[in-house]
């Protein structure tokens, strides 16, 4: 008999995958960056401790209340986004991991035939869902295919507040059904407890509806929730397609489409959901191109000399795109092409290769959707590139005057059409396309400031572009004026404040930040952003500690109410304090806090190099911190626990290097702390970005080789002449015959990361992929084993050694 869901849920591999899927979600509008940084610092220990808490009988894991952020929508109403504590996000993702693995066999039948949004990427994939851009194109293409098959009538609708109205009891029943009744009471109760805690908007009200928005785990559950309804529509023979909660029903006549829409509405009501009346319509399609396709932009380099230009033209029907692509490629002298189609206001970045025309997979017919990709080879694994939010080529568009002029013209034209009743939606999409690529320029300054008022739901991209106007006095004054006048959307004001900081540095925003932090009536998220900015200025630690005390007094009834703000205040104060007495006073505030978020922060700060406070100094708070006693022991803070050598632990556990218990601090000497810092960062980056992983591991390797030479070959000179000078020496290649090529290869990979576009040839380096890093780690196993074997045997180990944990 197969393991039940509970047993599969509580494995370390599942929680590690949950972490990978958490940090690889690029679509979230709000992220607890500090919380992720704290958790990543002791990733393995934190994951194991989280599993222990869930298994505990005496004091089991309990989810914390989430923090709500309200984001404006074009309708002027609000979308609720949930920001949960990092451990809670991982638990939620780990729960849904096993649900997805078990239930996907039932969902896969209708994928890319009828259902297109939130499609599961597959078991073990570090990105949980397939790329939304590709899936939305598949959805649009299916509408075109159905129309060309003779279905000229179409019904359109979506669901009112879909995520907010999903019934927990019904969801649990559906999960149990499609997981073949392997869901034990423990699993179901934990999932239900989490959803109940995170759906409430106030601490004293329990909710039985709603799942948190901003999570891939919720996206999958939402898809599963509609599966019963999907089956009914498909089995009744309707031409039914769905992208998340965006539904289309096509037919040959109006009556057929009406009947389908009525059936959908009735089944929706039975599921406890409601159709959006204002977005429900039935009409006959007159021109399919007007129905689904807008403009296409192409950024290309026809000369191959780095002189990029913008091409704008109406997009042809999909059935004609193959001929267009073939003809276009013949006229193009380079692979440096970026194609962007804007469909229903959504941007889709695609890549073109001279030799590759790849059709969409998974049951989409060749004539349905022909997509163009830039693929170095058919065998290469492009998982990281495909799922990454930034799928542009490494085109250096900054400093390209001609292209910037074209982007400005496109932006100005689109801006002038924002009030046009028929063209405003397309104009808004074109504006977004330009804002991500435009440099600062006086011609667009006033229009950008005006967009703060006109498009608050596009706050992120508008403020991103404004942030490029470094030290621009007009932008600084315009942002200050907006922040002072705008009183509707707190999230929007917070984005504007961050843009002000980017333009004019923290000093220009300091007085606003102080006012916001002191105002307890303000939204917690805006105050947290203000604290993050103010922490950049010196001399703020006393103010932060006073604010922290005040917040603790205000949150005695509900300790989680402002826990993320208190975390930011405490961390900001820590960065500026140098004296032991002040640091001890700060730790007393942190440890006396009732929130586990703050206790986890204390454990993190105690391990920082600059911290001169020890766990023993906080003896009076050991009982209050007892919930983390196992974690405190595992990371070596407890005086009766062995001191952990992080480098030894990591190369043993992560790289499978077999060494006797050794305190490598004695070998690295003065380089140990910096080497630990780089190795920690590389471990964290491995789960998120192959390029960042190579960069930080290379920095660790560079420090390692310097320490290796100083210890094993003390007579060698010029050790700080660069990484290549260390790997090219005869003494190195002779001593490490099996691994020296791997160390050289690491240097080459680092060059590809730092120089993606060669300034002389304008050619692009091959991007570092997930598959490549996984294969390279196998080589590192051999190289590290050889290096440390030689190193540890090269001279007698010093007699003064510390006990080392091998766990």
Image (cartoon, rainbow, N blue to C red):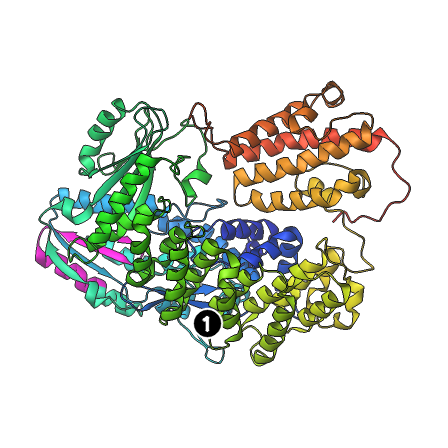
- Measured along the vertical axis of the image, is residue 738 above or below residue 285? above
Q: Residue at x 41, y 50 (%)?
A: 469
Which residue shows up at 62% across the image and 46% down it? 681
Residue nearer the viewer, 298 or 217: 298
Q: Which residue is mark 1?
A: 523
The x and y percentages for residue 518 are 53, 74
Instruction: In this rendered view, identify the residue nearer to me: 493 or 524.
Output: 493
The residue stretch that appears in magenta? 242-264
Query: Is 252 one of the magenta-colored residues?
Result: yes
Say if the magenta span includes residue 1: no
Residue 53 appears in the figure: no
Residue 650 is at least partly visible in this image? yes
Residue 377 lies in quadrant: top left
Badge 1 element: loop
Q: How many marks?
A: 1
Q: Observer-nearest residue: 503 or 335?
A: 503
Q: Does residue 553 lie above or below 159 as drawn?
A: below
Position in image of residue 5 (x %, y %): 52, 57
Q: In the image as oriented, which residue stretches furthest toward the right? A: 799
List x then y, in percent, for residue 285: 11, 50
Q: Quadrant of residue 496?
A: bottom left
Q: From the viewer's perspective, is residue 257 above or below residue 391?
A: below
Side (left or right) of 8 relative to 678 = left
Q: Residues within 10 Å of mark 1 (few under 14, many from 20)?
A: some
């Amino acid at each position: 008999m197969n393991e039940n869901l509970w047993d599969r849920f509580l494995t370390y591999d599942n929680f590690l995958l949950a972490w990978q899927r958490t940090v690889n979600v690029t679509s979230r509008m709000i992220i607890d960056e500090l919380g992720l940084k704290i958790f990543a610092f002791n990733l393995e220990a934190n994951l194991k401790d989280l599993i222990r808490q869930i298994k505990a009988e005496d004091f089991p894991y309990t989810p914390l209340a989430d923090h709500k952020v309200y984001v404006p929508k074009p309708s002027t109403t609000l979308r609720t986004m949930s920001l949960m504590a990092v451990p809670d996000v991982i638990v939620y993702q780990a729960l849904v991991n096993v649900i997805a693995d078990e239930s996907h066999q039932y969902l896969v039948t209708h994928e890319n035939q009828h259902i297109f949004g939130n499609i599961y990427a597959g078991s073990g994939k570090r990105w949980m869902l397939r790329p939304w851009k590709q899936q939305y194109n598949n959805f649009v293409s299916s509408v075109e295919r159905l129309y060309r098959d003779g279905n000229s009538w179409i019904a359109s609708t979506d669901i009112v507040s879909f995520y907010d109205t999903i019934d927990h009891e019904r969801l649990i029943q559906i999960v149990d059904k499609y997981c073949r009744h392997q869901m034990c009471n423990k699993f179901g109760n934990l999932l239900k407890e989490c959803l109940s805690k995170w759906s409430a908007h106030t601490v004293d009200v329990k909710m039985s509806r709603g799942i948190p928005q901003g999570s891939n785990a919720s996206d999958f559950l939402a898809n599963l929730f509609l599966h019963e309804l999907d089956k009914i529509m498909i089995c009744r023979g309707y031409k039914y397609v769905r992208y998340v909660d965006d539904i289309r029903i096509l037919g040959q006549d109006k009556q057929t489409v009406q009947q389908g829409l009525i059936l959908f509405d009735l089944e929706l009501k039975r599921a406890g959901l409601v159709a959006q009346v204002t977005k429900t319509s039935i009409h006959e399609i007159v021109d399919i191109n007007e129905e689904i396709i807008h403009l296409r932009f192409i950024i290309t380099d026809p000369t191959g000399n780095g002189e990029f230009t913008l091409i704008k033209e109406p997009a042809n029907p999909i059935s004609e795109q193959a001929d267009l692509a073939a003809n276009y490629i013949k006229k193009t002298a380079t692979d440096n092409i970026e194609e962007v189609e804007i469909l229903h206001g959504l941007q889709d970045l695609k890549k073109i290769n001279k030799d590759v025309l790849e059709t969409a997979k998974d049951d989409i017919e060749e004539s349905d959707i022909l997509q163009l990709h830039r693929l170095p080879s058919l065998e290469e694994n492009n998982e990281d590139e495909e799922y990454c939010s930034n799928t542009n080529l490494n085109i250096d568009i900054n400093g390209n005057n001609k292209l910037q002029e074209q982007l400005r013209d496109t932006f100005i034209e689109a801006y002038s059409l924002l009030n046009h009743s028929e063209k405003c939606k397309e104009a808004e999409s074109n504006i977004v396309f330009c804002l991500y690529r435009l440099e600062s320029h006086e011609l667009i300054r006033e229009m950008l400031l005006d967009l703060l008022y006109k498009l608050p739901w596009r706050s992120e991209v508008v403020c991103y572009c404004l942030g490029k106007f470094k030290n621009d006095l007009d932008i600084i004054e315009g942002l200050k004026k907006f922040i002072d006048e705008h009183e509707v959307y707190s999230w929007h004001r917070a984005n504007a404040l961050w843009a002000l900081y980017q333009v004019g540095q923290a000093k220009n925003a300091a007085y606003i930040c102080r006012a916001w932090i002191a105002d307890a009536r303000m939204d917690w998220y805006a105050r947290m952003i203000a604290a993050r900015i103010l922490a950049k200025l010196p001399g703020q630690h006393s103010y932060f500690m006073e604010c922290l005390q005040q917040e603790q007094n205000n949150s005695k009834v509900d300790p989680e109410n402002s826990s993320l703000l208190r975390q930011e205040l405490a961390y900001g104060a820590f960065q500026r304090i140098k004296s032991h007495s002040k640091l001890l006073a700060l730790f007393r505030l942190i440890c006396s806090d009732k929130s586990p978020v703050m206790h986890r922060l204390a454990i993190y700060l105690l391990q920082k190099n600059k911290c001169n406070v020890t766990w023993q100094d906080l003896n009076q708070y050991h009982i209050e911190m007892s919930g983390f006693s196992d974690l405190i022991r595992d990371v070596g803070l407890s005086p009766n626990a062995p001191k952990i050598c992080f480098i030894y632990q990591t190369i043993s556990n992560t790289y499978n290097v077999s060494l006797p218990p050794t305190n490598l601090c004695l070998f690295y000497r003065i380089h140990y702390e910096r080497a630990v810092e780089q190795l920690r960062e590389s471990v964290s980056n491995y789960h998120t970005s192959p390029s960042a992983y190579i960069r930080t591991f290379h920095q660790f390797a560079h420090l390692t080789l310097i320490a290796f030479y100083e210890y094993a070959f003390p007579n060698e000179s010029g050790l700080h002449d660069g990484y290549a000078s260390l790997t090219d020496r005869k003494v190195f290649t002779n001593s490490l015959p099996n691994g020296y090529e791997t160390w050289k290869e690491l240097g080459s990979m680092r060059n590809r990361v730092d120089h993606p576009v060669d300034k002389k040839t304008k050619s692009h380096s091959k991007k570092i992929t997930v598959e490549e890093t996984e294969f390279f780690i196998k080589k590192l196993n051999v190289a590290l084993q050889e290096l440390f074997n030689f190193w540890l045997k090269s001279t007698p180990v010093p007699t003064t050694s510390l006990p080392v944990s091998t766990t």
